Amino acid sequence: MALPVVAIVGRPNVGKSSLFNMLAGHRISIVDPTAGVTRDRVSAVVEDAGRWFELVDTGGYGIVDRDDLDVHVEQQIRFAVEQAALILFVVDARDGMLPLDQEVAGWLRVANKPIVLIANKVDAPGARVDLGDLHRLGFGSPLAVSATHRRGEEELKAIIHQHIAALPADEAPADPVMKLAIVGRRNVGKSTLINAIAGVPRVIVSEVPGTTRDSIDVRFERDGRTFVAIDTAGVRKKSKVADDIEYYSMHRTELSIRRADVVLFLLDSMADVGTVDKKLGRYIADQYKPCIIVVNKWDLAKDKAGSDDYGAYLSKTMIGLDYVPIAFITAKDGKNVQSMIDLASELFKQARTRVSTGELNRVLGEAMDRSLPRPKHGTGAIKMLYATQAAVCPPTVVMFINDPTRVTPTFERFLLNRMRETLPFAEVPIRLIIRARGGYRPTGELARNQVEK
């Protein structure tokens, strides 16, 4: 069942994103003094007093965008208003009623939706702010709030609750079975892929690099199951980050990778793998995240090189991701998008798999017998005592041996490859922890998983 939508609308720089973060309960939208930071619809599922709704932040109506995306931003606002069960019309209490506020009001009246007028930035208790002329907007007395200081929050939530109380949204939304983070450098087609997955123009697609700034969660369904796809800002060299907005965008991209179940790492088939791609690949590997290298715009490149040749090229250039599967898609046509989602589901299944201690010890024991590092002069051979799987997501194997100091990176890679060849972890990262007997005490998630086992 679709949740009722509460959309936040207003001209630029009235504090819409701050209000969104206040109601959502944590910082989701980027907040910056620069007008026009929000471009796409940023949404969050919110629960209050037993009622659930989808809260939507929108770009500033009438923004003069520095990348000439004004029309795209306005289109996203219109989509939000069309879907809304309630509109929160935000104005700046300190500025009073401005001509652009009147323009927004006139447009909203045509929408014929329930509207709550909110006068934001009433920051000090008892502050003398003249709200009288805001009545002329035609939506009754404004509610005075300060999103920054959370003043008026409870009253606003009560008003929202009154408006949605009669709507069918008693049940909590289904938890997503999988979260997919879509990452890559700028202009590789991430937003196009999001729209292909969602089946609607959910985010702005433009040839302008850096169009997406926030990380945007998009819920979608496949075969009765709910998924979340996370669109992220394009990554580029840190030395070229122009301002705070780009800094926060990069931070959100890294956070999206950490909270994802599977990462879809997009590459442009017509561009060479660069330094930014390699660094991003290393970050994904360091987080032990299941990953698919998604080669987009394959319709433009397939005549130049076959998939086998391109796969061999990636194996040489994307160090540390040699086990990662590759998907070739054309996002603008939706070609191979469903098979990519199916592959992501398979990787997530691998990452959650447990193997028995007996099977794990058999596999690693045979590997030790096949290829032991040559012992140093005056030392004995490395001996495995036993191994156990301590956690999933990622599969975490703790291996106890007589002397961990003699294990080389080459031998560790050999063990990992052997596990991928023989255990159901063929295409996902494995965390291998090598310890001396009695030298390992699991903590945090590892301890909890071991107790559950």
Image (spheres, rainbow, N blue to C red):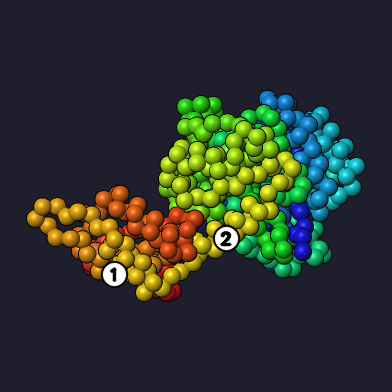
Q: Look at 30% across and 49% down and name the residue there.
A: 410
Relative depth, front residue between 34 and 301? 301
Q: Residue at x 32, y 54 (%)?
A: 412
Residue 283 drawn above or below residue 375: above
Mark 1 element type: strand
Residue 199: x and y in percent read 76, 49
Task: Identify the image quadrant of residue 369.
Answer: bottom left
Q: Which mark is residue 287?
A: none
Q: Nearer the viewer, residue 134 or 199?
A: 199
Precedes in sequence: disc 2 or disc 1: 2
| Residue 228 visible, this angle | no
The x, y position of residue 438, in whole percent, is 23, 67
The secondary structure type at the circle numbered 2 is: helix
Q: In the rendered image, which residue does mark 2 sit on?
A: 346
Q: Nearer the viewer, residue 5 or 423?
A: 423
Which amino acid lies under the numbered mark 2 shown in the image of this protein? Glu
| Image spot of residue 324 (x, y percent) | 50, 50
- Identify the residue at image location x=63%, y=52%: 340
Residue 393 horizontal side relative to residue 124, left or right:
left
Q: Quadrant of the N terminus?
A: bottom right
Residue 411 visible in rendering: yes
Label 2 to label 1, Cα distance in Å? Answer: 29 Å
The crowding category of the residue bearing disc 2, from other C-alpha atoms within 10 Å (few below 14, some 14 to 19, many at least 20), is some
* Amino acid of disc 1: Tyr
Residue in the picture at 74% in, 68% down: 170
Residue located beneath label 1 in the image: 386
